[in-house]
Structure formats: C-alpha cells, structure tokens
Image (cartoon, helix red, strand yellow):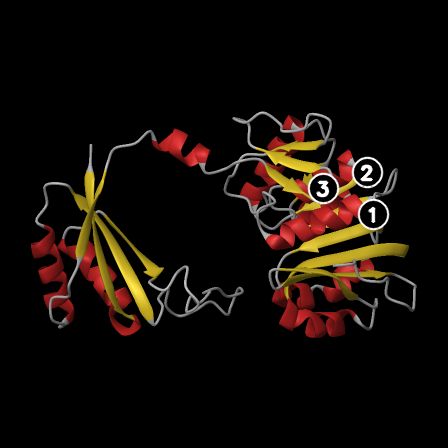
C-alpha cells in the first residue's frame, strides 16, 4: 500500500487549527514540523512538566498530512482551509511508498559509542567491540538509550568514577541504562526507581537481558523494600530541573557520608538554580557540559566541589 503526503508551510497562528481541520477533512495523520529545521533559524521546542509549550508549532511551521494515494489532496486542503476561515494555502505532495517499516526503523538505530569503552547496541546489531562494556538495548517507551546528552553525561561520569562493591541508586531510571552501567563497572547492590510502571518493566527486562542483578521499584515500593533512611555510596538522577529541585531534600538524604550525587537533565542556564536548591545539603558544581546540558556533581561532606572534567 502507498500514500501521499501533503506538505503545507504556514504561520504558527494557523498550524494547530489547520492540523485539526485536515484530520476532519480526511487526512490519515498530521504532524507539525519546524520549517526552518537544519538552518540557523531552527528553534528547539521543548518544556518541562508543568511548563510545556501551549502549542506544538513554530513561527514558520510545516504541516505534513498523510493521505490515501488516490485521495483528492486539493479538495482535502481546500476543505480544511475553509473550515478555519483562511484562503487555500499552496501545498506540495510527495509519494510515500510501502516499506518494511520494522526493518526501516531498525536501520535508523546503530550502535552508540559512549565515553571511552561503552557501546549501546540494539539487539539486531553485532557489537563493534566485543571486549568493550556492551549494553544490549533496543529503543522503546522508556527514556534512556544513550542518544540524549543527559544520559551520555551520566554514563560518562559512571565510567570515569567506577564504584566497585559500592551501593548505587539510580533515581528516575527510565530504561535502567545508568544502573546497568554502574553494575557492569563493578558496583555492589544497585537499585533503580521510577514513577512510571512501564519504565520499571522495561528496566527489569533490560537488566535481565544484560545479565545485571538490579532491583527496580516504583517510589512506594522502594520505601517498603529499603530500610528507613537507607543511604547509597553513589546516587544518580537524570530527570529535569524542576523535579530535581523539588526532590533536593530527598535525594540528598539518600547519599551516604562521603558518597557522591550526580544530577543531569539540567540545561546549562539552569545549573546555578539547581545547585542552589541542593546547597543546604550538598555542594554541587558542573562536572561536564554537552550540547547545552550539564551534569552536576558533589560529594557529601566535602566543602570543595570536585574539579570539572577537562573539555
């Protein structure tokens, strides 16, 4: 089966309404893209929980509607434009051939090299270096495959600071990738916590696939299965700045004396305010930065912040 995509460039004010109208007029699916993608005018569009953009649209938006190949694309666009009270916009069409979508999707995910000796390898690929620290991990619903800078920063920190025999807490574990790196680097007891039940199931499956003995819990289960006030030699949390600030007392309280706390999911411009939230408990500084994101790091009980990683 084949399809035809209708491509319309339009101002932000009409992008969302046109998308809805195209669906009503017979489009099979609609997406909105940044029409300036790949240029100096490209603008990232993202937000943290509670601060999401009101509209998934850009000042210069591109609306892409998928239609049946034999549909009347002109009629669909005209009907959608009339429904929202605008003149029929110019549009282009492009043919979408039937594909082996599973194979095509898999081809987009190659092994990822992280740090010095870590490879994240999808199950359909051979490991480029069988002697490296290999994590077999397929892209899925849970966050954390090593492709995002925040995940990479935490993985690089764990590789640079192995904790043989020590206890590790990965809070906001997602796919469980950070907990697995810690375990494969020789850590002792490792625990992962996440608020998403689907992430917990994914993390458990990933740990089993990679031969890692790790306990994963939802927050309430974590409280039940760990001793009151239990602390860890190494605590990592790759979340976002707003929840990280709210969790400052709790996360700091989980760090053992002399233990380390490493945070990511923090934009460089947010580093000072996140560090300020933790200042009453532990002194944090920027360990490394990548693509506008930073990893913050501190040692409980030390007045001085460990030096940042060399660029």
Rendered image quadrant of residue 34 = bottom left
Rendered image quadrant of residue 144 = top right
Q: Is residue 281 left or right of residue 118?
A: right
User: Residue 186's spot in the image, x, y percent?
Assistant: 83, 35
Residue 179: which numbered mark, if any?
3
User: Residue 85's spot in the image, x, y percent?
Assistant: 13, 72
Nearest to viewer (mark 3 / mark 2): 3
Pointer 3 or 1: first along the chain: 1
Work out whether residue 116 or residue 246 is closer to the camera in this orientation and state it: 116
Residue pictured at 39% horizontal, 60% vertical: 37
The local secondary structure at tag 1 comes to loop
Residue 210: which numbered mark, if any?
none
Residue pictured at 65% horizontal, 71% vertical: 270
Nearest to viewer (mark 3 / mark 1): 1
User: Residue 139's spot in the image, x, y percent?
Assistant: 52, 38
Check disc 1 and report the residue beneath it.
161
Quadrant location, the C terminus = bottom right
């Amino acid at each position: 089966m084949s399809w035809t995509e209708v491509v319309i460039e339009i101002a932000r004010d009409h992008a969302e309404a046109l998308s809805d109208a195209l669906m009503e007029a017979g489009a099979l699916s609609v997406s909105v893209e940044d029409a300036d993608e790949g240029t100096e005018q490209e603008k990232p569009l993202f937000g943290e929980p509670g601060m999401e953009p009101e509209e998934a649209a850009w000042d210069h938006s591109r609306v892409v509607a998928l239609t049946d190949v034999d549909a009347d694309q002109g009629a669909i666009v005209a009907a959608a434009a009339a429904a929202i009270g605008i003149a029929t916009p110019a549009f282009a069409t492009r043919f979408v051939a039937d594909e082996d979508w599973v194979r095509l999707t898999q081809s987009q995910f190659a092994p990822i090299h992280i740090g010095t000796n870590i490879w994240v390898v999808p199950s359909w690929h051979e490991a480029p270096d069988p002697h490296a620290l290999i994590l077999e991990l397929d892209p899925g619903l849970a966050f954390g495959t090593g492709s995002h800078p925040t995940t990479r920063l935490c993985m690089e920190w764990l590789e640079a600071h192995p904790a043989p025999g020590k206890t590790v807490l990965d809070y906001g574990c997602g796919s469980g990738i950070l907990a697995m790196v810690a375990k494969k680097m020789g850590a002792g007891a490792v625990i992962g916590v996440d608020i998403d039940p689907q992430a917990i199931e994914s993390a458990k499956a990933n740990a089993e696939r990679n031969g890692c003995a790790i306990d994963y819990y939802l927050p309430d289960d974590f409280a039940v299965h760990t001793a009151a006030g239990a602390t860890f030699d190494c605590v990592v949390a790759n979340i976002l700045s707003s929840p990280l600030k709210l969790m400052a007392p709790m996360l700091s309280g989980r760090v053992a004396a002399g233990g380390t706390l490493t945070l990511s999911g923090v934009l460089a411009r947010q580093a000072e305010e996140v560090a300020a939230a933790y200042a009453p408990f532990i002194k944090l500084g920027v360990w490394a930065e990548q693509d506008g994101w930073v990893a913050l790091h501190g040692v409980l009980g030390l007045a001085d912040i460990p030096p940042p990683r060399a660029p």
